[in-house]
Amino acid sequence: MKTKKKDSIVEQVKAARKQSREEELKAHGKAINYQKVMASKKQYNRKKNKADDEVLPYLFMYAGH
């Protein structure tokens, strides 16, 4: 009897998720990802800035013997 009860709970959860997703698609027109954190474009990002500066020419002087 336990498996039937557990299966019914799982089915209820799946049905609720499906309904929620359908409502989200109707409201927004696309799926919304709630788990991914979007970085602000205005926030300073040193790693990105250094990648942009990579195209600058570097001059290395070699004093060979």
Image: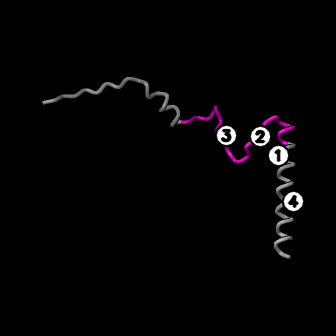
Query: From the viewer's perspective, is 46 left or right of 61?
Result: right
Name the residue: 82% across, 62% down.
Answer: 10
| Range of residues picked out in magenta | 24-45
**Residue 48: which disc?**
none
Q: CA distance from mark 3 to mark 4?
A: 31 Å
Q: Are marks 2 and 4 in contact (CB under 8 Å)?
A: no
In the image, what residue type sits under mark 2? Ala
Give whichever of discs 1 and 4 has the lower sequence position: 4
Give whichever of discs 2 and 4 has the lower sequence position: 4
Name the residue: 83% across, 39% down.
Answer: 25
Mark 3 or mark 4, whichever is nearer to me? 4
Residue 16 position in % (x across, y down):
86, 54
Foreground of the two, 12 or 65: 12
Q: CA distance from mark 3 to mark 2?
A: 15 Å
Magenta-drawn stretch contains 46: no
Query: From the viewer's perspective, is 55 left or right of 46?
Result: left
Which residue is disc 2 drawn over? Answer: 31
Q: CA distance from mark 2 to mark 1?
A: 8 Å
Which residue is disc 4 drawn over? Answer: 12
In the image, what residue type sits under mark 4? Gln
Disc 2 crowd rating (10 Å Cα; few below 14, some 14-19, many 20+) is few
**Residue 38: which disc?**
3
Mark 3 or mark 2, whichever is nearer to me? 2
